[in-house]
């Protein structure tokens, strides 16, 4: 009963230890170095809690971290076995304990375990001296008790296997004394027990034996050849026995480590000495340290590396030049200080790509390991991932990280991520390392095709060829492969147009769209006069599962071409004009104009229309015949035919005008109209206009304010002008005589300039008149009214100061010669409807005035 209770407690204890190891995530094993290949280190699968057959099914394997592990996992049994030679000294050097960190991966599900394998030392290395023979020179005057340091042996093993003891072959003159130079090393000293006699024995041959603490112990020997020298009885002495120096590992070559100084009480050549470095531990110190033989300066000859050796122990020997030479010794301890000279290292142990764009947050993408060879704060590593989204790092164990998904992915926005895992240590300044990962994202059909525009405006010229390409539509589907392959079609019932002749026609009867390229084709020629706007929908569908689609509206505007010539319109209220024979003549028009009609009077209006639109329907009118300066002109855009000047009898009874109507298209199209204008008396023109009425072809009255009234007053106006000129001349004569009688002595004043006052200004000019003498005569006949004003010459004031004071500041409108001309002529001006027009020069009155 007690035995069963004991066994149950033992089983529970073992299970507790196994579960504690698994929860801790780390299994520890130890194996002696030089174990044979195939040696079982431990039952790894069993210790990890895997059942039989699981190690091979779940691919239990080791992941190396930069150096050969010399162990492997047996696929069948899941045991950790030795695969190659294990040499602790090669793996760890002098470091103790020698622990190898291994990572073990299993799949389905993916898990990582850490295994620590300790390689224990065996006594497989014998002590080794720097040389098989050591020559020593000792003066015969050396006193008993004199000490002579010897170079100790070194053992590559560690621990007890590296603990050395020394023994000296029997000698009556010499003995061996062991000294601890520091806590790690034991230095053998050769002690003189009995004075030497060179004449009796000039050379002593001894054997120094070093024995390690292993089982069984191993030994190494060196032959000591001691030469007894004659009296140089004072050896050099250093000012201190131990020199301790600290130096950063990044110190440059040539850096001064220390300066040792030894003195010799002898004189002359026996006091001159040279320095040398001996007893290096480790021996690699010979390659990085040297001493100046004359000055005793210790300098670096190579680079220091804290990670390889952190302490150098050696001795400085000062040897004089006496006969025999004597030497003194001191110890130098050089401690190498760590600097942050090793950047972190990042390894990717596992990578699962590509990642579906619908992967859940928290999905593990990669496993990484991070390490730094530096120590202390310089070896503490912080890791981050860039960019910060959509991935993140999760620390699983010390130096192990998982790259996980932190945000939802969108392949259409980013199809591939260049992820950089950045590691930074805690040194000053910190060193950084990075490892780039390429993480592609696989596609799912989550985007519908989308057109660049919701509404496309397409401009197409009419009369296009059937099959002509009107436009190219393009819908973008950011998905890839079949998910992004788009086909196009005109949506059924998605649009159409009503034609000018009535009815409705679907868009598919006018246009078609290529399913692959999205090119929009015309199925038939378009006619602007029939169809101006066609609106329909185009559908884009991808090839994904399930298929997604998008729509766009197309507005097709038909652009007008200049394919219609201008057409002349018939007269308002009637057909074309009637010729002399009374038959209809196509394109022939008639109009009447009265003799003496002023310039600018409209006699007819040509009317035309163009079936095109816009610039193609903008018409201009040109007078084709007669060429040159004829009596008529035509408005460029109004089509109004008007007199270019006053009509005269020399113009003949009839004028034939050929008028070309052109549009502004390219090329321009035209139509021709022939207008016959009959020149008649004013009364006849009025009767003709009244007879034609509104039915005349472009006819308009010769005088819109009453042509009959104007004709009746023409003769009266002529006689009125003659009478006015005569009266004005008589009045001028009276004034001149009156002035000559009154101001005879100052007759010369008549030649001076006089002021002129502006009386009328308009778009046809300005006139001046006398303020002192003016006459007005109003003649009315019928509805027309005209004001006739007669201006007499302006007499200038007499010269002198008074004249200067009364002269106005306004600018003089007439020069002196023009003022003098008023004495010989006068003008009659008719003012009608706010317009001032110079009417007639009174030559008769002028001649009468000149004769007087």
Image: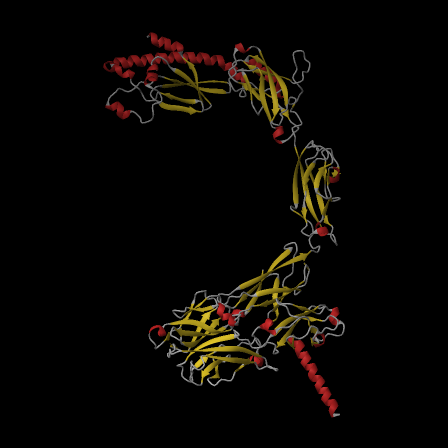
The quadrant the C terminus occupies is top left
Query: Which is nearer the eye, 176 or 342?
Result: 176
Q: Residue 733 location in percent, x, y?
A: 33, 12
Residue 695 appears anywhere in the view: no
Q: Is residue 474 above or below residue 442?
A: above
Q: Residue 648 location in percent, x, y?
A: 52, 12
Query: Which is nearer the eye, 846 or 351?
Result: 351
Q: Residue 701 location in percent, x, y?
A: 57, 19
List the single residue furthest toward the left: 745
List the single residue furthest toward the front: 199
Q: Is residue 470 left or right of residue 719?
A: right
Identify the residue at horizontal 47%, vertical 23% (top origin): 833
The quadrant the N terminus occupies is bottom right
Q: Give the quadrant of residue 22.
A: bottom right
Q: Is residue 13 left or right of residue 196?
A: right
Q: Is residue 776 left or right of residue 798?
A: right
Identify the residue at horizontal 57%, vertical 13% (top origin): 679
List the single residue furthest toward the right: 53
Q: Is residue 21 above or below residue 587?
A: below
């Amino acid at each position: 009963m007690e035995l069963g209770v004991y066994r149950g407690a033992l089983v529970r204890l073992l299970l507790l230890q196994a579960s504690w190891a698994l929860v801790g995530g780390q299994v520890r094993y130890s194996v002696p170095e030089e174990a044979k290949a195939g040696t079982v280190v431990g039952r790894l699968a069993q210790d990890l809690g895997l059942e039989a057959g699981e190690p091979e099914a779940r691919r239990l394997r080791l992941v190396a971290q930069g150096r050969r592990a010399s162990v492997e996992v047996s696929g069948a049994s899941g045991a950790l076995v030795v695969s190659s030679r294990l040499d602790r000294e090669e793996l760890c050097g002098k470091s103790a304990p020698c622990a190898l960190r291994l990572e073990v991966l299993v799949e389905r599900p993916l898990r990582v375990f850490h295994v620590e394998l300790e390689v224990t030392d065996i006594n497989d290395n014998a002590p080794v001296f720097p040389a098989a023979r050591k020559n020593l020179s000792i003066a015969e005057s050396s006193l008993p008790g004199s000490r002579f340091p010897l170079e100790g042996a070194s053992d590559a093993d560690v621990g007890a296997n590296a603990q050395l003891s020394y023994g000296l072959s029997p000698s009556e003159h010499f003995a061996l004394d062991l000294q601890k130079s520091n806590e790690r090393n034991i230095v053998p000293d050769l002690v003189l027990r009995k004075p030497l006699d060179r004449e009796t024995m000039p050379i002593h041959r001894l054997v120094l034996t070093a024995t390690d603490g292993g089982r069984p112990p191993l030994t190494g020997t060196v032959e000591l050849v001691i030469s007894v020298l004659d009296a140089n009885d004072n050896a050099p002495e250093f000012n201190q026995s131990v020199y301790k120096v600290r130096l950063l590992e990044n110190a440059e070559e040539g850096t001064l480590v220390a300066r040792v100084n030894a003195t010799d009480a002898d004189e002359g050549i026996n006091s001159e000495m040279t320095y040398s470095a001996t007893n290096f531990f480790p021996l690699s110190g010979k390659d990085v340290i040297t001493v100046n033989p004359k000055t005793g300066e210790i300098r670096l000859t190579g680079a220091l590396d804290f990670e390889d050796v952190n302490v150098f122990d050696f001795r400085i020997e000062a040897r004089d030049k006496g006969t025999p030479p004597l030497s003194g010794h001191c110890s130098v301890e050089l401690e190498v200080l760590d600097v942050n000279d090793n950047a972190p290292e990042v390894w990717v142990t596992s990578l699962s790509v590509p990642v579906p764009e619908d992967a859940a947050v928290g999905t593990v993408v990669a496993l990484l390991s991070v390490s730094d060879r530096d120590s202390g704060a310089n070896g503490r590593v912080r890791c981050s991932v860039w960019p910060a989204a959509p991935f993140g790092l999760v620390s699983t164990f010390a130096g192990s990280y998982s790259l996980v998904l932190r945000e939802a992915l969108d392949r259409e926005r980013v199809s591939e991520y260049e992820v950089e895992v950045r590691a930074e240590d805690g040194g000053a300044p910190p060193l950084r390392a990075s490892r780039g990962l390429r993480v592609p994202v696989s596609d799912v059909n989550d985007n519908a095709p989308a057109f660049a525009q919701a509404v496309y405006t397409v401009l197409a010229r009419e009369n296009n060829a059937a099959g002509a390409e009107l436009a190219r539509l393009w819908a973008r589907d950011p998905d890839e492969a079949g998910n992004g392959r788009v086909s196009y079609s005109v949506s059924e019932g998605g649009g159409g147009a009503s034609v000018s002749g009535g009815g409705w026609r679907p868009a598919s009867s006018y246009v078609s769209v290529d399913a692959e390229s999205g090119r929009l084709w015309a199925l038939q020629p378009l006619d602007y006069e029939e169809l101006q706007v066609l609106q329909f929908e185009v559908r884009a569908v991808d090839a994904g599962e399930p298929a997604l689609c998008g729509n766009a509206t197309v507005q097709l505007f038909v652009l007008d071409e200049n394919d219609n010539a201008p057409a002349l319109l018939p007269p308002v209220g009637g057909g074309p004009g009637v010729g002399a024979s009374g038959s209809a003549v196509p394109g022939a028009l008639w109009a009447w104009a009265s003799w003496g009609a002023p310039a600018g009077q409209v006699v007819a209006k040509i009317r035309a229309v163009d079936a095109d639109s816009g610039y193609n329907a903008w018409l201009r009118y040109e007078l084709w015949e007669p060429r040159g300066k004829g009596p008529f002109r035509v408005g460029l855009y109004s089509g109004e035919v008007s007199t270019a000047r006053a009509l005269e009898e020399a113009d003949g009874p009839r004028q034939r005008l050929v008028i070309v109507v052109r549009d502004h298209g390219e090329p321009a199209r035209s139509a021709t109209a022939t207008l016959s204008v009959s020149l008649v008396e004013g009364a006849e023109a009025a009767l003709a206009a009244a007879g034609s009425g509104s039915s005349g072809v472009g006819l308009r009255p010769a005088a819109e304010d009453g042509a009959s009234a104007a004709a009746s007053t023409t003769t009266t106006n002529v006689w009125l002008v003659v009478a006015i000129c005569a009266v004005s001349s008589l009045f001028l004569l009276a004034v001149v005589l009156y002035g000559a009688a009154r101001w005879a002595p100052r007759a010369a004043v008549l030649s001076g300039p006089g002021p002129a006052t502006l009386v009328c200004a308009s778009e046809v000019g300005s006139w001046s008149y006398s303020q002192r003498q003016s006459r007005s005569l109003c003649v009315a006949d019928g509805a027309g009214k005209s004001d006739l004003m007669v201006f007499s010459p302006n007499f200038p004031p007499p010269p002198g100061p008074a004249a200067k004071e009364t002269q106005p500041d306004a600018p003089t409108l007439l020069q002196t010669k023009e003022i003098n001309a008023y004495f010989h002529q006068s003008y009659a001006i008719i003012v009608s409807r706010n317009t001032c027009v110079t009417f007639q020069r009174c030559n008769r009155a002028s001649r009468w005035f000149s004769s007087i």
